Image (cartoon, grey):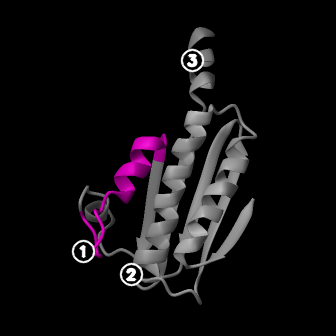
Amino acid sequence: MILELAAIPENVGVARLMAAVVAAQGEFTVAEVDEVKLAVSEAVTNAIVHGYRCDGSRMVRMEAALEDGELVIVVIDHGRGIEDVAMAMQPAVTTDPERMGLGFSFMEAHMDHVEVTSQVGQGTRVVMRKRPAARDVASLKGS
């Protein structure tokens, strides 16, 4: 699934819904789908608020797919970029004093893997991966 959305806060819900639709096709529990929705909310909000400063003329791209049972979600913006990704991923670090700076922390808490690449003036790419917990348990039992 590929989704391109105007960089406005109202579109965060659309991204959440589409991610949930893709996740629901896998072996995820309702709680796991909720975790995916939260992580997507944070990634798309970061693109809108920090990458584009809510410039609705810009577009956020989200790709979502199931690959061998694993959910892979990619959120891409072509906005401001992040000067120091490692620093930005620390809790309470933000470019907007009105925000708590916990977006990346929430993504990491609810997804199995989060990879952020960014270039100043070029934009940011966030890749998030999640496996269904039931699948992990089943593979352990088979070992």
User: How many angstroms separate mark 1 from mark 2 (CA)?
Assistant: 20 Å
Residue found at x 30% / y 65%: 88
Residue 97 badge? 1
Find out whether residue 65 is within the magenta segment: no
Label 3 SS: helix
Judge whether residue 100 is colored magenta: yes
Q: Please tell me whether mark 1 or mark 2 is closer to you in this view.
A: 1
Tell me the residue that label 2 is attached to.
120
Q: CA distance from mark 1 to mark 3?
A: 41 Å
Q: Are there few (<14), some (14-19), or many (20+) residues within 10 Å of tag 3?
A: few
Between 99 and 129, which is closer to the camera in this rendering?
Answer: 99
Q: Earlier in the sequence, mark 1 or mark 3?
A: 1
The residue where tag 3 is placed is: 137
> Please, what is the three-letter code of the amino acid marked with disc 3?
Val
Q: CA distance from mark 3 to mark 2?
A: 41 Å
Tell me the amino acid under the disc marked 1.
Answer: Pro
User: Which one is closest to the eye, mark 1 or mark 3?
Assistant: 1
Q: Are marks 1 and 3 in contact (CB under 8 Å)?
A: no
Which range of residues does the magenta coloring cover? 93-113
Residue 108 position within the rendered picture, expressed as x and y whole percent measured from the top left = 40, 47
Going by the numbered disc 2, the residue's amino acid type is Val
User: SS class of the residue under badge 2?
Assistant: loop
Left or right: 78 with respect to 85? right
